Amino acid sequence: MKDTELTQRKNDHLDIVLNPALARKTIRTGFARWRFEHCALPELDLDSIDLRTVLFGRTLQAPLLISSMTGGASRATNINRYLAQAAQTLGLAMGVGSQRVALESEANWGLTSELRQIAPDIPLLANLGAAQLLGKHGVDYARQAVDMIEADALIVHINPLQEALQTGGDRDWRGILLAIEQVAKTLAVPVVVKEVGAGLSASVGRQLAGAGVAMLDVAGAGGTSWAAVEGERASTPQKRAVAMAFADWGIPTAQALCDLRKTLPHMPLIASGGINDGIDAAKALCLGAQLVGQAAASLNSANTSAEAVIEHFQILIEQLRVACFCTGSADLVALKHATLLRIENDA
């Protein structure tokens, strides 16, 4: 595919996700089925609640990942700078968007060592699609992606549904698991594997754990539907009809998280996919996530300024802090033992 076509695709994705009427949610995350038991006597100082955690040897001030949002579009330069500034200011982790365009052309769109200069203290995660790891150059691509931004880890995103539905998508997925295993064995930094909104099943999680992956991002259904996004981009009514049939496809985020935690009790997990606020984040952490990721919900602020991104995540952090306070949880370890009740008849 030509560079201009890839860049146009990325611009289309941004336009659609930024338009709430188009990037519609057709399936729920499942977090509404869970309710915390309220603690009316927390015996805590709200301002002393400790939200710190550690990721890849770096301390985070809150267990939040500014998830992969964009790569390969010209406006991504400012977006990435704003995100990096916010992550550094608040002490959060940051994952960049796909670096494929930056690796295959001279257009890096802000995906350079400048990001590390802006955010010297945070965990910074590089990002490549699994299909780019196939072939003899796969490991080199992975190394280049990490070196390009001086990353602490590499995210490998797996998105078979999206690739199947988009024009020019990668349709041959034979050998992907072996390619991921090869990269995980040879790369100097940990490998994180994430879906992009259709969720990771327990069986796939077991395969990835066996391949040496260090962390999994469940990236479940309930946030942006990339099938619906590709349906909006479709060049013909027929292609749109095929894509829109899958608009509610996938494993809801809460279900994927619970299933993976039960199957892989020691695997570090990131919960992303439709995380709306700090209460969702608290539920995800209680259900077994080490980290909570958010992307689309913060894209409008990321398209505005670093200050807007900071304000957005300050709200989420304060919501998470209050959730800890009202469950009697002094820190994230205590939050994992908070009482979370399943409401079977809730939506």
Image (tube, rainbow, N blue to C red):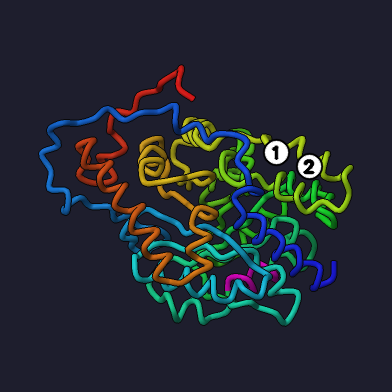
Amino acid identity at mark 1: Ala
Residue drawn at (27%, 27%) of the image = 37
* Residue 26 in sight: yes
Q: Quadrant of the N terminus?
A: bottom right
Q: Quick check: 316 left or right of 67?
A: left
Q: Position of residue 42 (x, y in %)?
A: 14, 37
Type of residue at label 2? Ala
Q: Which residues are magenta?
A: 140-146
Is residue 80 or residue 91 the one in the foreground?
A: 80
Q: Is residue 231 magenta?
A: no
Please tell me the numbered disc located at residue 152.
Answer: none
- Most extreme residue toward the top is 345
Instruction: Answer whether labels 2 and 1 touch (C-beta < 8 Å).
Output: yes
Binning the other alpha carbons within 10 Å of mark 1 as few (below 14), some (14 to 19) or many (20 upward) gives many
Residue picked out by circle 2:
243
Which residue does the image show at 67% across and 35% down from the upper left? Answer: 248
